[in-house]
Image (spheres, rainbow, N blue to C red):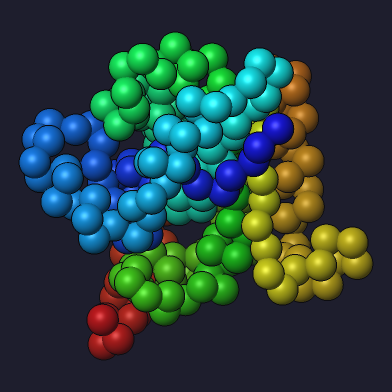
Amino acid sequence: MIFSLRELSDWQNGSPFSTPLLPITDCEKTIDKMKNAWWGLHIAFYVGVIEAIKPGTKFIDGNEEAYYYTSPGEFYEVRNTLTVDAKALIPPELWEKHSCYNRIGHAIAAEYITGNWLGMSPFPYRLTGQGVMMSTEEKAQWLEHNTYYALKTADEYAWLYTEGMNWWTGEKVPEGFKEALFSAKLKVATGQPIGYEIDQMIKNAQNKAAEFYKDKE
């Protein structure tokens, strides 16, 4: 198994850390964008791996951009982006291998949800500050939401990234976060709906952050 934090997921419409190439509608403009893209060699690397990959190997795109998702639609939409739209970046003779060996995972960023990345460039404070504006319960709901849909839409793996939180000792782990992870996993495993939506909660938090940090933009 090869687990990559980011491969063709670099080219979805998402955060400032990805370059939105997919879906491709203009080849010349796409080539120009790739010249200055952060991860421009990932396409060639991916094509090389798919060309040489052997039966029994899984090549997992960890979709690190899922850190910043706030809706179920983003998790479902990226599946089509990486399985269908991404074929435009791959030689046609490798399409079958792409379909056979490429697997989709998703990332979950507890630090982003808590607001610990406040002021991270080039994001606007409306986004990095939304977690700061949430209650403890709301942050746990957002974490459960993203964990639930990450597990629901991944082929097998979802991964959690944290920096200062110690999940073994509980140090700096926000209240309700451990329970949120277990709840999401249980709901997916037993076929339960998540039971709530976060759209309005996210909108309210972003509006508050935009107003509170307006002098910093």
| Residue 94 picture quarter | top left
Q: Position of residue 48 (x, y in %)?
A: 47, 34
Lateral position of residue 179 relative to residue 216, left or right: right
Q: Position of residue 110 (x, y in %)?
A: 62, 59
Residue furthest bottom in the image: 215
User: Which residue sits at x=34%, y=80%?
Assistant: 212
Q: Position of residue 30 (x, y in %)?
A: 16, 43
Q: Position of residue 43 (x, y in %)?
A: 38, 41
User: Up-down: is 136 above or below 183?
Assistant: below
User: Up-down: is 201 above or below 118?
Assistant: above
The quadrant of the picture occupied by the C terminus is bottom left
User: Which residue sits at x=12%, y=31%?
Assistant: 25
User: Up-down: is 205 above or below 151?
Assistant: below
User: Which residue sits at x=46%, y=21%?
Assistant: 98
The quadrant of the picture occupied by the N terminus is top right
Lateral position of residue 148 relative to residue 50, left or right: right
Can the viewer see residue 83 in this picture?
A: yes
